[in-house]
Image: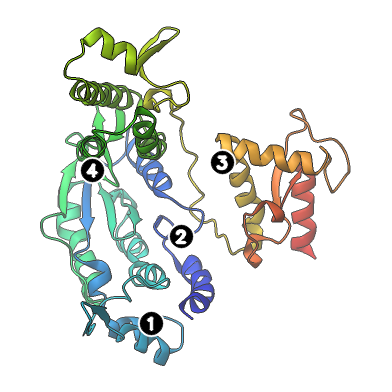
Amino acid sequence: MQALYWLALDPVAETRGDPNSYGFRSGRSTADAIAQCHNALSRKHSPKWVLEGDIKGCFDNIGHDWLVGNVPMDRRVLSKWLKAGFVEGHKLFPTDAGTPQGGIVSPCLANLALDGMEGLLKDSLPRRAKINFIRYADDFVVTGASKEVLETQVKPMLVGFLAERGLQLSATKTKITHVTEGFDFLGWHVRKHKAFLRIVPSKRNATTLYAKVRDRLRELRGAKQDDVVGALNPILRGWGNYHRVVHASRPFAKMDYLITRALWRWAVRRHPMKGKRWIKRRYFRANGSRDWLFQTDRFSLVRLASISVDKHIKVRADANPYDPKDEAYFDERLTRRMRSTLQGRRRLYWLWDRQEGLCPVCAAKITKATGWHVHHVVWRVYGGPDRLSNLQLLHPTCHVQLHARATKG
């Protein structure tokens, strides 16, 4: 039932949402949030001060009265969801505040409650204050021209806005920082060195990954090498793909070195009676100029340094996946995303082969020279999925014309 209400609420949340809110929204991600941070702070005359905001227990403390009074849905149904409570250890615990734990609709309700902060700040303060607001779920940053602007004007506005919704800023996690000192946001460390804004994986995030790898190696101390590679590859690939959108080349190389050392200790512990040369030949191989590659005849451990670091193209702030005018824009972003990954390129080839290399609109050949766009047969705005059965490859001009005719008609 919550899923049905979410289908109706999500377009409302998207239309009302702050332009630079990126959490729990279709077509937006942490990569878009950090790209907006780069846009806001990287220029010569960009603001130099940042308020790092964190809402204390956001999902557990949103006021029920505010939600019932402001969320555009059946109030009786919403009230029952909010007051339903939760069961733990065969005991029912009532819920006097917060959104349904684990509920499909909870992120949407949280966005509806938090949207409006960006508009409040920009409407209340002049341009010379250099206000930029970037939010992902309950984490956000606000830039300002000076520490005084953030301390005496921005922070009181945010406190008042959140108080109406039964929320408050975390005293320990909310602080004001100069960009030359750096700050952490969404697992990245953002810091300005003279004229260059450097964004890298945060120290805490890298330490957490390394600890996770070491814990897995401890659990697999008696496992085969193939099993170790199979256990570590998803962890490393996921971490690398998350951070590939920032300046991660050096952090990747350093993490490769640390993981190789951890694997060496794992191998030495497995064979206390063998010499180091034997262990090196048994577990580590060379490939061209690369040495100390942890691999077998079948599998090879992912090298983070081999993951390409690319600049992420941020989603347009005013783009709405439920607006037919933006359908072609999101199709173009899907095309670019599919080109950038091996799995995406396989999907593109499958579509091209299914269509026998022809554009369904003009029946002409689709080639590298002509280019192509991915088109949703049933548009995303009308509930069309990203499944292959609902996708087609069209020439870029055919795609634009098709959407232009459909929008006019």
| Disc assigned to residue 191 | none
What residue is shown at x 25% (from left), y 67% (from top)? 58
Q: What element carries label 1?
A: helix
First in residue order: circle 3 vs circle 1: 1
Indicate which disc, 4 or 3, sits on the residue closer to the N terminus.
Answer: 4
Q: Seen in the image, is 217 located left or right of residue 303? A: left
Q: Give the amino acid at mark 1.
A: Asn
Q: Which amino acid does label 2 sit on?
A: Arg
Query: Can you identify the residue that label 4 sits on?
Result: 184
* Camera-side residue of 354 and 222: 222
- Return the mark for residue 25: 2
Measured in 3D between alpha carbons, the distance from the residue under mark 4 to the one under mark 2, in whole angstroms, is: 22 Å
- The residue indicated by pointer 1 is 70
Residue 337 is marked as 3
| Position of residue 402 measured from the top left corner of the image (x, y, whole percent) | 79, 53
The 10 Å Cα crowd at callout 2, few under 14, some 14 to 19, many 20 or more, is some
Residue 293 vertical position relative to residue 226 in the rendered view, above or below: above
As drawn, the residue found furthest toward the bottom would be 76
Q: Which of 126 and 90 is in front in this view?
A: 90
- What amino acid is labelled 3 in the image? Arg
